[in-house]
Amino acid sequence: MDADTARLVERRQRTFGPTSVLFYETPMHVVSASGVWMTTADGQRYLDVYNNVPSVGHCHPRVVEAIARQAGQLNTHTRYLYDIIHTYAERLLETFPAGLDKVTFTCTGSESNDLAMRVATAATGKRGFIVTDNAYHGNTAAVTDVSPSSMPGKPLPPHVRAVRAPDVYHAPTDDLAGRFAAEVQDAIDSLEADGIGVAGLLVDTIFSSDGIYADPAPFLGPAVAAVHAAGGLFIADEVQPGFGRTGDAMWGFMRHQVTPDIVTLGKPMGNGFPMGGVVSRTDLLEAFTKSVGYFNTFGGNPVAAAAGLAVLNVIQDEGLVAHAADAGQYLRERLRALAGNGHPEIGDVRGAGLYVGVEFVRDPLTREPDPDLARRAINGLHKKRVLIGAAGRHGNVLKIRPPLVFSRENADQLVQSLEEVLSI
Ligand code: PMP
């Protein structure tokens, strides 16, 4: 570590203490970013395939300009009337199916899921939630309760049931939809037997922290029907897959041909400006606001609206949804070709659009997870100036989710670098 980096690490430990988490054996001191590139203090440029928050590209000039212009004109909270938040709300809601026609603004994905759970509890009169068994939904107390990945090895709270992630690689089936629904039904039965009942099924529609499970879609319909039959709601967490990343549509739930009761938004919504939202229906919000009000000081402020509107405009004008489909398909083909060309340690390549998982295994027959190789690949790619992370219960799945402007040429660089790292 050079002296400047060491000094920063020391200042950080002195002020942050034990909550400080840093990536990599040698932490990175970054100073600027643009598009799919991040630049460090020593002037090196890194290909970013990790960060999905700057979704339309790091420091996109249109988003930067919109934020700066609005910050210089007016920034306040939502208890006054101003035009831009309503323009944004209308434009955002146009991207949802009929019925999902109300939005409540928050500042983070955690706040969005926390609010969605409160709305579901008020609307159903029940307290139970069903999630997948390595899900992450955020960091508030209530949301940590439904995030098994935050408390590995610890028992879930009494009102939470976990079902297996929809994994057809380790547990093949011809009927994924039926199997997933049967497990959700068991969870419903268990919550009812305990007198808790089901308020909602909450899933990230790309199952990112579980290990990225996209196919064979659609597979969520029967599980959603089972929850509805039991009086519960379906909450789609779109914090990871939303805003076009899956390449099929703006929202990950759309590839499953289901309409959620509540949708939660965050991360890419403001391209880095902290903003989130909950999209739902009047009847659900009425039940909630009858029992308790909701006000979020920073949620939906004019600068957030300007950032969000610029993001929607860029997604549309640059055709980023179709681009994500094309670049993602190309990347998966190249990764599969790499696997077939003498790299059996790549057991599976999967995903949708620019949310791609590469699963490392010790043996392609037993499919035993290989988290050590994932760790080596992450650090090896870092040395080759490619930023990447891992997902899944075992941490053995490379998680590829770059800014959506990621090109075929960027995909070539990633695959070439991965090949070099795996061949060492
Ligand atoms: N839901 C999912 C699926 C997430 O991945 C995350 C963040 N990683 C959250 C919710 C929470 O978002 P935030 O960190 O903005 O609170």
Image: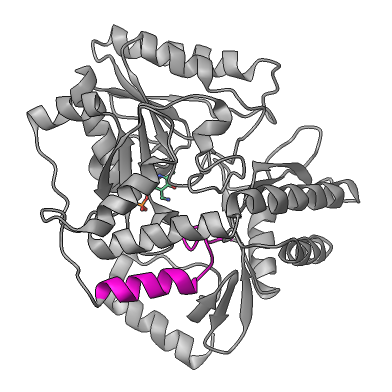
From the viewer's side, name the closer residue of 27 and 387.
387
Measuring 54% from the left and 19% from the top, which residue is drawn there?
180
In the rendering, at what x and y percent does residue 233 appear? 34, 22
Asked if residue 19 lies left or right of residue 373, the reply is left
Q: Quadrant of the rendered structure where residue 167 is?
A: top right
Determine the image quadrant of residue 211.
Answer: top right
In this rendering, the answer to whether 391 lies above or below 68 is above
In this picture, which residue range is highlighted in magenta? 50-71
The location of residue 152, given as percent across then percent down, is 43, 40
Whether residue 54 appears in magenta in the rendering, the answer is yes
**Which picture quadrant has residue 36?**
bottom right
Give 224 or 357, whichever is nearer the viewer.
224
Whether residue 249 sits left or right of residue 87 in the image: it is right
| Looking at the image, residue 44 lies above or below residue 366 | below
Does 85 appear in magenta?
A: no
Residue 155 seen from this side: no
Which corner quadrant holds the N terminus?
Answer: bottom right
Q: Relative to 170, does residue 104 appear above or below in the rendering? A: below
